[in-house]
Image: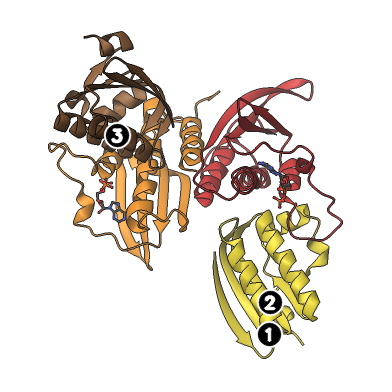
Chain colours: A yellow, B brown, C red, D orange
Amino acid sequence: MQIAARHLDKITIFDISGDIDLATSPQLRKALLREFRELKVPRVVLNLGAVRYMDSSGVASLVEGLKASRDVGSRFILFGLNRTIREVLQLSKLVRIFEIYDNEEQSVAP
Amino acid sequence: MQIAARHLDKITIFDISGDIDLATSPQLRKALLREFRELKVPRVVLNLGAVRYMDSSGVASLVEGLKASRDVGSRFILFGLNRTIREVLQLSKLVRIFEIYDNEEQSVAP
Amino acid sequence: MLCVVRNALGQLAATLGFSEPECHAVVLAVDEALTNIIRHAYLGDEERPIEASFRRIHVPHDGQGGDALEIVLEDRGVTANPKKMCGRKLEDVRPGGLGLHFIRESMDTVEFSRRNGRNQLRLVKILHVQGPRKGS
Amino acid sequence: MLCVVRNALGQLAATLGFSEPECHAVVLAVDEALTNIIRHAYLGDEERPIEASFRRIHVPHDGQGGDALEIVLEDRGVTANPKKMCGRKLEDVRPGGLGLHFIRESMDTVEFSRRNGRNQLRLVKILHVQGPRKGS
Ligand SMILES: Nc1ncnc2c1ncn2[C@@H]1O[C@H](COP(=O)(O)OP(=O)(O)O)[C@@H](O)[C@H]1O
Ligand SMILES: Nc1ncnc2c1ncn2[C@@H]1O[C@H](COP(=O)(O)OP(=O)(O)O)[C@@H](O)[C@H]1O
């Protein structure tokens, strides 16, 4: 997994690529917690378009990110979910708790 | 891989089981070097009957064992090689340098 | 290395004739099971031995016989506590506790057992379309 | 985990129709290649990412086409030194230096390349008996 960060006004976009699994999810978790807890960024957008695989440890990191965003009153948005990633979120019955959009435009809209 | 040791008069027999690979060959190497260099056992017999797999790191450990045995003038004997293990030794062109027997009886014969 | 296991297994499942979502399910289940072994049975140590076998088997199914993929994973780690192994209710939103749920949802058979100081996990996925897919 | 990779790959090769010695050869080659990546490209660090793909491909062979198993392994480790990658003469008996020899003896094609900061190793094993073996 690789994370590239882009910064708009009060929005951080993380472009994620590769596999989110036991080995890599701690890195994602850390990046999200830093953005919400330390930097208090009002909106963090995760571009999952280039993520090929995610397991329950990845879902757990997303849930931790979501909780952290709620604690500080920020928004946490996902977009670009391919079928595999959607299936995994569906399996976890967590699709509905996340704010998910189809594309970046919608994700950064005011 | 697991190593079980049996001790006859001036002979140590190691019953090896499992896979000899990158992760496990250091353990085999250490056991062999200890027997030859430290304990100066005159004959070490390796029972490979329960070894399912061996790669080049396993072969390397056997070669190290053989060298150590020559340094101290001991004998190093292999027996119980299945087809896969024989193929790997053949591939390494090292079958001929080892003292190999069909069974334990021949391996411990005076 | 988990990633290498996933890709080899995904190709194995495809070659056996599983559909793409079924291949994903098998890969997810085994990934979760290996992750659990490393985290819970071996307390995070990735170097400890995990035995795995992957076999095509014949199972009774729908009144007639059918083929299936059987995967057996074995570790020598701490004894699993059956009370903890039940997974959790999905209603409470918290990180973690999803792995066993994913495994159960993904496979047709999930059996834990402990024998000779080893934990064994047996997973079976039934092949509904018979025969391997060509050109996969 | 190397052991899990080996067993999944062995079953994949068998399912594709390779004979038992051919399955052993494929498993040995990939084991040696992964071992080399961990030892030489990643200097012993087992946690670094290794990408792997396993595909059935069509190759021209013996005047006609045939199927083959293509395996591509990629790492982001230190650039391999082509001078060292040649393997060594087998005549001098010493531990080590056998891995590349095993890989070359086991596979029909062995290609190293470096692009975009990654080392790529492409291995191909040609399938002589066409079609998958049943009941493997
Ligand atoms: N292989 C295993 N060995 C021992 N305990 C396990 C194993 N797998 C799961 N468990 C137990 O079951 C619980 C639930 O597992 P799981 O649903 O995968 O969620 P998580 O791993 O996130 O806790 C774990 O917290 C652990 O206590
Ligand atoms: N993946 C790799 N990356 C970098 N260097 C490599 C790699 N594989 C092999 N080499 C180089 O080629 C040499 C020969 O490799 P090999 O035949 O496998 O024997 P050994 O690994 O025992 O030295 C190694 O010592 C190393 O210098």
Mark 2 element type = strand
**Marks 2 and 3 in Cβ contact (< 8 Å):** no
Q: Which residue is found at the position 23% from the left and 52% from the top?
A: D85
Horizontal and vertical percent position of residue B15: 39, 22
Provide the residue designation for mark 1: A11
Q: Which residue is outermost to the left? A: D91
**How much space separates mark 1 and mark 2, taking CA atoms?**
7 Å
Of tags 2 and 3, the one toward the viewer is 3
**Marks 1 and 2 in Cβ contact (< 8 Å):** yes
Q: Which residue is found at the position 53% from the left and 34% from the top?
A: C51
Q: For the residues tagged 2 and 3, is the chain the same?
A: no
Provide the residue designation for mark 2: A45
Which comes before the other along the chain, label 1 or label 2? Answer: 1
Give the quarter of the image for residue D128.
Answer: top left
**How much space separates mark 3 and mark 1, taking CA atoms?**
62 Å
Q: Give the numbered dot on residue B34.
A: 3
Q: For the residues tagged 3 and 1, is the chain the same?
A: no
